[in-house]
Image (cartoon, helix red, strand yellow):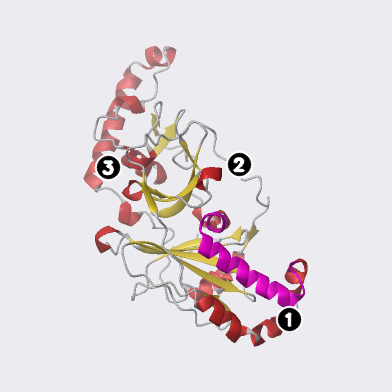
Amino acid sequence: MVCVVAIIVIAAQYNWEKSRLVFAVNDFSYPNYAVFQLPQNHQFPVPKDPHIVSTSTTVDRVGTHVQLYCSHRWRDYTIISRISDELNDITQSAADAFLSPIMEKNNCQNEIVRVQREKQKHIYFNKFFGYSTPRWSNFKNTSCKPKLIAELAFQGVLNVVGKYNNFVPPSRKPSLTIDINEPMELSDLVYQEQVYIGTDWKVNQRALAWYEGHLHIFKKTKRGSWLPFTDLGSERQNGDLIYKHMLENHPSFSQTHHNLVSHVSNLAGGHGRLEAKLRDPAFLDHVDSQATTIKHNVGQVKLEPLSPMGIWDTKSYISDQKPYSKSSRVEKIHNLNYVGQYAPHRRFP
């Protein structure tokens, strides 16, 4: 049985450009995550497909709101495509609404270029003393704020190296380079200087945050610094991690998910038989016959919003540890090359 967590953020001051809808699937396939513009009514879409059930969350204020969709028939990205068929996919351009003014970015880029050229004039001296690359410590009190460094790196303009470079995707090796030799603060990078913690916070120390237009998970290390837990720059494959995080941290979401799966499992004669039964057309028809009861039970649930926690005064430094390995996930992603047949009018990489 495949389920999707849908998350709507209504941005501060009802900024509709920054407001958005994210889907994350509990299935380890590719893609299993997407970002969309909000529906015109700014509410979670009501599925037209009779084989999809959903909770009934109402979006009524600024904040980050949660909805659950599940289907016994549709798998992988198919379920997202059947919910979002009238929405505009902005996954590729999700960061655009959060970008800094172009003048600020150009000033920062020009300053790094200037310092890099100065170092190249004394290349042998600088290489001998290990100073051949511009260092973040030379810029942190200038116009080159952490957010600008991140934006330039995500856009492939800036190659970020050094001890504290975990806050950007792997570099495409552009000619312009900066050495992050001192830690930046997570609060300077994420939207509203906030993270969203949950009930599992004391155990796993993981939190959600809006970063570069996407929903990401960050983990607090034993030393108190922060490390990205989801993949940066490969957001389309983070859906299963986000869904699992919600199961572990959002009680009403988790309870609704487990109640629904248990109900369908009982129809299958036990949880161990469910996956096999879901490939049996006769069983799918049997579940359809129970649709009224299932939709009634799930449709009564209204999930509460996520609660933000400000981190601007907590010394929320980015960690120098290596990124987390996703070794617990299946090695081979089931690549949905046929995703276009579900959403032929959307832009996919």
Place of residue 316 in the rendered image (x, y in percent of width and height, measured from the top left) = 39, 37
Q: Relative to 59, is 286 above or below?
A: below
* Rendering quarter of residue 160: top left
Q: Which residue in the protein does label 3 denote?
A: 105
How far apart marks 2 and 3 lie (CA) works out to 32 Å
Place of residue 277 in the rendered image (x, y in percent of width and height, measured from the top left) = 75, 74
How far apart marks 3 and 1 lie (CA) works out to 57 Å
Q: Nearer the viewer, mark 2 or mark 3?
A: 2
Give the camera-side residue of 148 and 271: 271
Q: Which residue in the protein does label 2 denote?
A: 325
How far apart marks 1 and 2 lie (CA) works out to 38 Å
User: Which residue is outermost to the left?
Assistant: 103
**Three-letter code for the amino acid on which mark 1 is drawn:** Phe
Residue 254 among those drawn in magenta:
yes
Q: Which secondary structure lies at badge 3?
A: helix
**Three-letter code for the amino acid on which mark 2 is drawn:** Ser
Image quadrant where one finds the N terminus: bottom right
Place of residue 182 in the rendered image (x, y in percent of width and height, measured from the top left) = 39, 27
Q: Which residue in the protein does label 1 denote?
A: 283
Q: Which of marks 3 and 1 is in front?
A: 1
Q: Give the range drawn in magenta.
A: 243-271
